[in-house]
Amino acid sequence: VVKLVDQIGGINIYSDQDLKFCNIKRGYNEVDGKCALAFARERKSYTTGDRHRGENQEEVIKAIINVFLFETPALSKGAIIIIPSGMF
């Protein structure tokens, strides 16, 4: 995740609360790969713990997909994206 997010120039994630790491504030945040992974792994800041971590993981995946669907001009022309091995 770290390499992929960094390679695409970061992602825009939504957080429903301020978090102590990576300067993540409530609302939309532009994050790099390291912060995206930390956001996807965080559970201790939430009362629902693991359930909320799953929601954050979905948020990171959606943000990555959005970059490819809406911010990558090549995809609008039907290009195929090849993700190098070792990215996940």
Image (tube, rainbow, N blue to C red):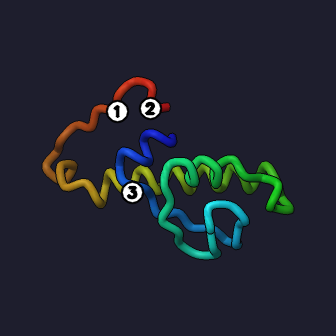
Between marks 3 and 2, how big is the CA–CA gap? Answer: 18 Å
**Which class describes the residues within 10 Å of circle 1: few (<14), some (14-19), or many (20+)?**
few
Contact between marks 2 and 1 (CB within 8 A): the answer is yes
Of callouts 3 and 1, the N-terminal one: 3
Q: Mark 3, mark 2: which one is toward the viewer?
A: 2
Q: Is residue 34 left or right of residue 43?
A: left
Q: What SS does tag 3 mark?
A: helix
Residue at mark 2: 87
Q: Quadrant of residue 19?
A: bottom right
Q: Position of residue 3 (x, y in %)?
A: 45, 39
Residue at mark 1: 83
Between marks 2 and 1, how big is the CA–CA gap? Answer: 7 Å
Q: Mark 3, mark 1: which one is toward the viewer?
A: 1
Between marks 3 and 1, how big is the CA–CA gap? Answer: 16 Å
Please name the residue shown 30% across and 60% down the image: 70
Q: Position of residue 14 (x, y in %)?
A: 57, 67
Residue at mark 3: 66
Please name the residue shown 36% across and 55% down the image: 67
Q: Position of residue 84 (x, y in %)?
A: 35, 28
Q: What SS does tag 2 mark?
A: loop
**Residue 1, relative to residue 51: is it above or below?**
above
User: Please, what is the three-letter code of the amino acid marked with disc 1?
Assistant: Ile
Q: Position of residue 49 (x, y in %)?
A: 82, 54
**Which class describes the residues within 10 Å of circle 3: few (<14), some (14-19), or many (20+)?**
some
Q: Is residue 45 left or right of residue 77?
A: right
**Residue 55, relative to residue 7: is it above or below?**
below
